Amino acid sequence: MTLRQKKELAVRVIGLLEKQYPDAKCSLVYSQPHELLIATRLSAQCTDARVNIVTKELFARFHSVNEFADADISEIEDIIKPCGLYKTKAKSIKEMCIQLRDEYGGSLPDTLEKLTKLSGIGRKTANLIMGDIYGKPAVVTDTHCIRITGRLGLVKSKEPAKVEQELWKILPPDKSNDFCHRLVLFGREYCTARSPKCKDCPLAGECVSKAE
């Protein structure tokens, strides 16, 4: 498939997903920008549903970047333990909030380069912040995005960084962030990792991998 064909396919897929899921938004619950950053860090190897349960208590206990920066790390660990990898995650949450407090006055930086210098933050999370907090073009290459764009034939790689690079070339910038949110919903409902519901899939007419 040529680059032009991939761009045309991407536009068609985006249109179908917009009809299927008109209200595209992140499934993580937050009320302040730093809360989305923390929730996304907690979501590594953990479901969004569980993260939302944990962050309800976490954000009720610590209300600001400064409070997280000053927190007793053992208290953070106790609250986030159900998310798994809690010691590593607690360490990076406290460290990133110290960085935000000391280097950015408590606000989130607005570039990928600066965001990825925060403790525990990779390009996936940084892109989510760029899209959802700052309203800029973003490509969030989570497991749903990688799996589905591969099945559709839009990308060849399964490595997050390479998938991101490939998608930047073919996605309309103003549609990219919402497209990634819709892929999450689509991946949960139809294009699951195992036993995808190909017969009922709204993208079946565009998919090169659909089961007969």
Image (tube, rainbow, N blue to C red):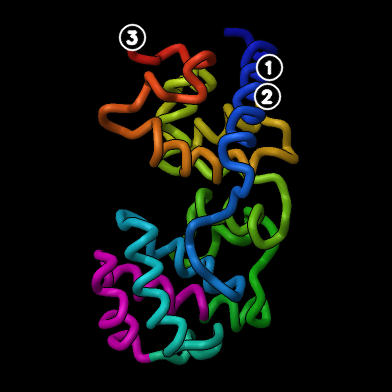
Residue that label 1 marks:
8
Q: Is residue 110 above or below residue 59?
A: above
Residue 48, picture quadrant: bottom left
Q: Nearer the viewer, residue 16 or 70?
A: 16
Position of the N terminus by quadrant? top right
Which numbered marker is on residue 11? 2
Magenta segment, principal secondary structure? helix
Which numbered marker is on residue 16? none
> Which residue is at 64% across, 70% downward?
108
199 within the magenta span: no
Identity, as a three-letter code, of the amino acid under mark 1: Glu
Residue that label 3 marks:
212
88 within the magenta span: yes
Badge 3 or badge 2: first in the primary sequence: 2
> Dot 3, how many residues are within 10 Å of its Cα: few (below 14), some (14-19), or many (20+)?
few
Identity, as a three-letter code, of the amino acid under mark 3: Glu
> Which residue is at 70% across, 38% downward?
175
Residue 132, picture quadrant: bottom right
Badge 1 or badge 3: first in the primary sequence: 1
Query: Which label lies toward us, 1 or 3?
Result: 3
Q: What range of the chain is rendered magenta?
A: 72-97
User: Which element type, helix, strand or loop, lies under badge 2?
Assistant: helix
Q: Are marks 3 and 2 in contact (CB under 8 Å)?
A: no
x and y, in percent, of residue 88 in the image: 30, 68
x and y, in percent, of residue 61 in the image: 42, 89
Mark 2 to mark 1 CA distance (whole Å): 5 Å
Query: Which label lies toward us, 3 or 2?
Result: 3
Q: Is residue 176 above or below residue 132?
A: above
Q: Is residue 181 above or below residue 171?
A: below
> Dot 2, how many residues are within 10 Å of its Cα: few (below 14), some (14-19), or many (20+)?
some
